[in-house]
Amino acid sequence: MTDESPFFYTWQRQRGARGLEITGGEGCHFDTPEGRFLDLGALVYQANAGHGHRRIIDAIKAQADQLCLSTPSSHYPAKEELARELLAAAPEGFTKVFFTLGGSDANENALKIARLFTGRYKTITRYRSYHGASMGAASLSGDWRRAAVEPGLPGAIHVMDLDEGVPGTQIPRVLELEENVGAVFLEPVVGANGVLIPPAGYFQEVREACDRHGALLVCDEVLTGFGRCGSFFAFERFDAQPDLITCGKAITAGYGTLGAVLVHDRVARFFEDEELVCGLTHYAHPLGVAAALESIRVYRDEGLVANALALEAPLLRLLETLPGTGARALGLLGAVDLDLDDAQLGALGGALRKRRVHAHLKGKRQLRRDRGGAVVVSPPLSITEEQLAEGIGRIAEAIHEVNGD
């Protein structure tokens, strides 16, 4: 495909743009006209249950036969069941769910809920963060995608609260909150900007600061949720206690369009007598709800969250064999830093494609460095250790090719 396509390609110049045509897939592989690829990226981090999963596909078909249209205020059994499943997976005290179309507008609506609840418009997020592509979510984001659409929402404050000077290490820094900050939005693990894993005690310091200043803590689980980091939600690995949890991507394992905001009772109670000024035409669309409900059952029945945790140590060992530095992993989300410039990263992308392995390459814009990149690995949670080893081996071959080894 070239720039003659009648649609836009995302996040790139259109002249000469080329898309990867996916024709099908099964398990940890997807099919293209070029051949079968080993998916070490879960596409764009959403395919946690893998490709071609018949249970999820059949659940969507059954829902379409039963109920395929609804209004935002509709009540139907699958919608209530999904909400209860999500609340059961959340920490004690979460009592309400606001459904959305995906991760970006989950963060948009969490932002609105925080403003309505606190009466404050300021937010704190990290510079190395990504919270979505819509205008409010882009304003929250700290990475290069925000700069292209500035000025964004007023009050979006960004901090450098994880040590950027030493690759592979993170040092906590207490957030100095102003009195009029309404919410702190944090990815439990910084995902698309390099897999930064916070140290022990980090979230406790943030929680204490939020409580001290009356701000809400929002955990953005759009990338890290639904087993990716070896627990249903990644914040569980750090004993974090959020007020709001935002979800997207793997909530449907990529098989439908849906997101959600999970709301603690201390916030939800406010809207018993105050108007919740949020609503979307396709809020909780039945097909997305069906995909999410069956995906959660698959995660549980197939032990995918436990598999992600069990493969954390093997993934880290494999990443440490790559010609790079700062290998790190939590569950099945891992990365290693590479001494490559952006041109070399482009060549590495071609070398990976030639070997039919899909992973995420990050350049200096994502990592906020003058030089150096990273490769991020986030396969479907059904992957085996043998498949991981095969894929990391292909990545190693591709890096050696670019390095001229």
Image (cartoon, rainbow, N blue to C red):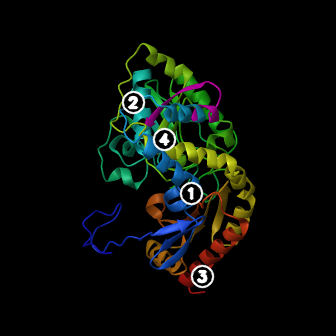
The amino acid sitting under disc 1 is Arg
User: Cβ–Cβ below 8 Å for labels 1 and 2?
Assistant: no
- Contact between marks 3 and 1 (CB within 8 A): the answer is no
- Distance from disc 3 to disc 1, alpha carbons, whole Å, reads 38 Å
Crowding near pointer 4: few (<14 within 10 Å), some, many (20+)? Answer: many
Instruction: For marks 4 and 3, give the CA distance.
Output: 44 Å
Name the residue beneath numbered marker 4. 289
Query: Magenta residues?
Result: 86-99
Q: State which tag comes first along the sequence, 4 or 3.
A: 4
172 and 122: which is toward the camera: 122
Real-space Cα separation, disc 4 to disc 1, in angstroms: 16 Å
Q: Is residue 87 magenta?
A: yes
- Which residue is pictured at 65% across the width and 63% down the height? 326
Mark seen at residue 112 = 2
Q: Earlier in the sequence, mark 3 or mark 1?
A: 1
Name the spot of residue 111 as percent of width and height, x first.
42, 33
Secondary structure of residue under mark 4: helix
Quadrant (top left, top right, bottom left, bottom right) of the C terminus:
bottom right
Closest to the camera, between mark 1 and mark 2, is: 1
Q: Are marks 4 and 3 in contact (CB under 8 Å)?
A: no
Element under disc 3: helix
Q: Residue 293: name its quadrant.
A: top right
The span from disc 3 to disc 2 (Cα, nearest Å) is: 48 Å
What residue is disc 1 on?
54
**For the view shown, which residue lies furthest in the top direction?**
273
- Label 1 neighbourhood size at 10 Å, few (<14), some (14-19), many (20+)? few
Q: Nearer the viewer, residue 249 or 297?
A: 297
Amino acid type assigned to the residue bearing label 4 in the image? Val
> What secondary structure is found at the residue carrying circle 1?
helix
Q: Secondary structure at mark 2?
A: helix
Q: Position of residue 234 (x, y in %)?
A: 62, 44
Q: Nearer the viewer, mark 4 or mark 3?
A: 4
